[in-house]
Amino acid sequence: MMMAGEAPLAVTTYAYNNEGLRAQNAPVDWIAEDLIPVLLYPLTMARNAPHPYAAALFYDFLLSEEGQRLIAKEGRVVGHPKVEPIYPRMKELQNLLGTPRVQLNTLEQNYKLLKDGIQILDEVVLKRKSS
């Protein structure tokens, strides 16, 4: 909605998406708030996977420097200390990993915080009654 000009700001965006848009000269910007919520995406495997050792090898690859570089090429911030983000401004977020500014949320917490954030956006920023 923001990119279509229908909203002046977006509260729940990913910095890497904004940086990708900025690289294409889109008129967007972002700031890292004082408390940055993050959600980790865990690696999972089916209990009765037909090739569990192949999955384990794939996990090893994803966690390796080479695998982390592949993920970073998508604009994401990764935890590997030798892998730099592709967007220079994302280094700001990478430097915050492990600091009190980063709040690691569970899926359950993320849902509640998103719901609360949407209510604040509706009632305070957009000045409309939340549904």
Image: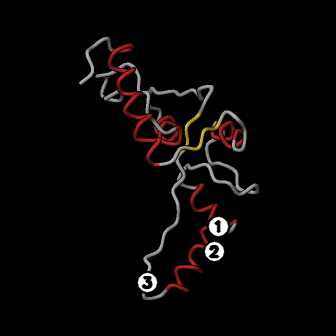
Quadrant location of residue 82?
A: bottom right
Q: Residues within 10 Å of mark 2 (few under 14, many from 20)?
A: few
Q: Is residue 19 above or below residue 41?
A: above
Report the amino acid beneath label 1.
Leu
Q: Secondary structure at mark 2?
A: helix
Which comes sooner in the sequence, label 3 or label 1?
A: 3
Q: Between 105 and 28, which is closer to the camera in this rendering?
A: 105
Q: Between 121 and 24, which is closer to the camera in this rendering?
A: 121
Q: Position of residue 48 (x, y in %)?
A: 42, 84
Whole-angstrom CA distance, mark 2 to mark 3, is 17 Å
Q: For mark 2, what is the residue?
A: 60
Q: Between 35 and 91, which is closer to the camera in this rendering?
A: 35
Q: Residue at x 52, y 66 (%)?
A: 43
Residue that protrudes farthest toward the right in the picture? 82
Q: Residue at x 47, y 41 (%)?
A: 109
Whole-angstrom CA distance, mark 3 to mark 1, is 20 Å
Q: For mark 1, what is the residue?
A: 63
